[in-house]
Every structure is written in structure tokens, then in C-alpha cells.
């Protein structure tokens, strides 16, 4: 007798895809286009909220299709540790090249004054760490990548996952947790929904370790969640698939580690059978709207 495996993240993913397919509305005159020049239409819903309590092993790692978790973490290191907008650094150091189509026309070789450059320019990460350590129970711990003055300096990709809010709490046993909410304006859910959640869960774990706290609750608020018209069949297939395991993310570092010393190799994914996932729930060829 086969027993179905319960995966918290898989269930969230299936519910979100089902809601988009059932209740989503079709956009009009979309900005993005596929590589062949065809308008990249989407169906979408608004104001979606996902909640993961990491202390209860609720991690956003799906098994409905292969997930490049280590590449996702490297991208976060490029933004918040390297604090860079340089595409050559992203490719040569972090082995990622999927941002190339969004190269800035004003600042060749970069994505413009965006993401990591915004973090560096406004000292956003340093200020966050200082605030969480020296005023842990304050309610002003925020990183915003949505800086209009930066947008005026160059063209470039407008940040999708653009705002994080951080709060420290102490439970009845005296354990201090760090909770974080990610605000995302737009999400191509089949392609990157779970990737974005993994990335910012990793960032929460890194910041918690740097401050000496336990990673707590990660909430992911997405204003507009969409499925591209060329991804609809993939979405339907994912809904029909069965979970393979229930993975756990671990960050194997000492307490109060320097945030900037944490490496991709410090992350461990337990109960995450990559080869089995590739075999049973293979990936899809997904055309991107640029």
C-alpha cells in the first residue's frame, strides 16, 4: 500500500496554481514578449499570501519539478553580500546568466542601478544588521529595493521581490526568533515562485545566524501572481503530480557568524532526492516573457 507523502510547499504551490487557473483574469496589451516577438499574455490573481514557520520544518522547497536551489542562493549572495549589479560577476563568480536579457542600455554589463547596487549605495544590509542587533525589538527593520532616485539614474529591471520587513520576538521559553515578510509586486509563478521563496528563506536564515537568533516565520506576500499563457500546460501537470519528499533547509554555521562570511556550501538540503525528482517530476521547457 502506497502512502502519499505530505509536502507543505507542494500543497501551497498546487493551491496557488489551481486558484490562478480557476479565478485568474487575462491581461491586456502586455509589456513582455517572447523571444519570437509574440506578446506574452498571462492569467493572474492578486494579493496572495503564503506562510512558512521554519521552526516547524515548513520550508518552501517543492518537489513537483526540479528546483535549482543552490543557484537561487547564489543569486541572493550576489545581491545582498556582493551587493553588485555586474552581470560578469554574476556569470563568472556565481555561474548564473539568466539575467542577461535584462542588461541595462544606460550601464552596459549591468542591470542598472538596481538590486545589489541599491543595497550597496544605501547601505541597506549593514543598516539592517546593525538595527536588528542593537535594537532587536524595534519595528523599523526594513529593506526596500524600490528607490525612485535609483530608477532615475539608469534604465534596468524593476525589482519584483523588492521589500523585506523584519521583526524579532521572544517566545515563552525565552527563545529569540527572527521573522521576515517579503513583499513581491509580481511573480511568474511556474518559473520562479518557489525559487523566490527559497531565496528569501535562505536570506532570513543568514540574517538570523548573523544576529544570533533562530529563524522563525517567513511570510511571502505577492501582489500579482501570474501564469504565462505558454506555461498553462506545465501548471496543470504540476497540479496532477505527487510529492516525492518533504525537504528541510539547514544552514550549518556557528551562532553570530559574520553575514558576509556565509557561503552557498553552508546550506544543506535534507531529504531532497534531486535525481528522483528529475526522473518522476521532470522539468519543463518554459518560454520567458522579456
Image (spheres, grey):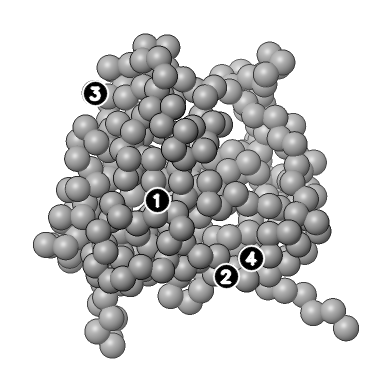
Callout in the foreground (4, 3): 4
Residue at 36% across, 29% down: 85
178 horizontally vs 99: left or right = left
How far apart are the two marked residues, 3 and 2, measured between alpha carbons? 42 Å
147 horizontally vs 92: left or right = left
How far apart are the two marked residues, 3 and 1, measured between alpha carbons? 22 Å
Q: Which residue is mark 4?
A: 272
Residue 190 place in picture, x, y as percent = 65, 44
Residue 109 place in picture, x, y as percent = 42, 19
Label 1: how many residues lie within 10 Å, few (<14), some (14-19) or many (20+)?
many
Q: Which residue is mark 2?
A: 270
How far apart are the two marked residues, 4 and 3, measured between alpha carbons? 42 Å
- For the question of whether residue 48 can be seen, the reply is no
Label 3: how many residues lie within 10 Å, few (<14), some (14-19) or many (20+)?
few
Residue 64 place in picture, x, y as percent = 71, 57
Label 4 with label 2: CB-CB less than 8 Å: yes
Label 4: how many residues lie within 10 Å, few (<14), some (14-19) or many (20+)?
some
Pick the front one: 202 or 218: 202
Dot 4 falls on a residue whose secondary structure is loop
Q: Which residue is mark 1?
A: 182
Q: Which residue is mark 3?
A: 149
How far apart are the two marked residues, 1 and 2, measured between alpha carbons? 24 Å
Residue at 46% across, 20% down: 103
Pick the front one: 108 or 21: 108
How far apart are the two marked residues, 4 and 1, measured between alpha carbons? 24 Å
Amino acid at each position: 500500500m502506497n502512502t502519499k507523502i505530505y509536502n507543505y510547499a507542494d500543497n501551497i504551490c498546487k493551491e496557488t496554481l489551481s486558484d490562478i487557473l480557476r479565478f485568474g483574469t487575462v491581461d491586456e496589451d502586455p509589456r513582455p514578449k517572447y523571444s519570437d516577438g509574440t506578446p506574452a499574455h498571462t492569467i493572474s490573481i492578486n494579493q496572495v499570501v503564503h506562510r512558512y514557520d521554519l521552526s516547524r520544518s515548513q520550508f518552501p522547497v517543492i518537489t513537483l519539478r526540479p528546483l535549482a536551489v543552490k543557484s537561487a542562493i547564489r543569486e541572493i549572495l550576489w545581491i545582498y553580500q556582493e551587493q553588485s549589479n555586474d552581470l560578469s560577476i554574476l556569470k563568472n563568480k556565481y555561474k548564473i546568466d539568466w539575467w542577461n536579457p535584462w542588461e541595462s542600455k544606460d550601464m552596459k554589463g549591468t542591470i542598472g542601478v538596481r538590486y545589489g547596487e541599491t543595497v550597496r549605495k544605501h547601505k541597506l544590509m549593514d543598516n539592517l544588521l546593525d538595527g536588528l542587533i542593537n535594537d532587536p525589538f524595534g519595528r523599523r527593520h526594513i529593506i526596500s529595493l524600490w528607490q525612485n532616485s535609483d530608477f532615475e539614474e539608469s534604465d534596468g529591471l524593476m525589482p519584483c521581490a523588492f521589500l523585506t520587513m523584519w521583526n524579532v520576538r521572544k517566545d515563552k521559553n525565552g527563545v529569540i526568533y527572527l521573522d521576515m515578510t517579503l513583499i513581491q509586486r509580481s511573480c511568474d509563478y511556474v518559473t520562479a515562485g518557489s525559487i523566490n521563496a527559497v531565496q528569501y528563506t535562505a536570506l532570513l536564515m543568514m540574517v538570523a545566524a548573523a544576529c544570533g537568533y533562530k529563524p522563525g516565520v517567513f511570510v511571502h506576500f505577492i501582489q500579482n501572481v501570474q501564469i504565462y499563457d505558454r506555461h498553462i500546460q506545465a501548471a496543470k501537470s504540476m497540479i496532477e503530480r505527487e510529492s516525492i519528499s518533504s525537504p528541510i533547509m539547514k544552514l550549518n554555521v556557528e551562532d553570530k557568524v559574520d553575514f558576509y562570511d556565509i557561503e552557498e556550501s553552508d546550506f544543506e538540503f535534507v531529504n531532497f532526492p534531486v535525481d528522483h525528482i528529475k526522473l518522476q517530476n521532470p522539468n519543463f521547457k518554459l518560454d520567458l516573457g522579456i
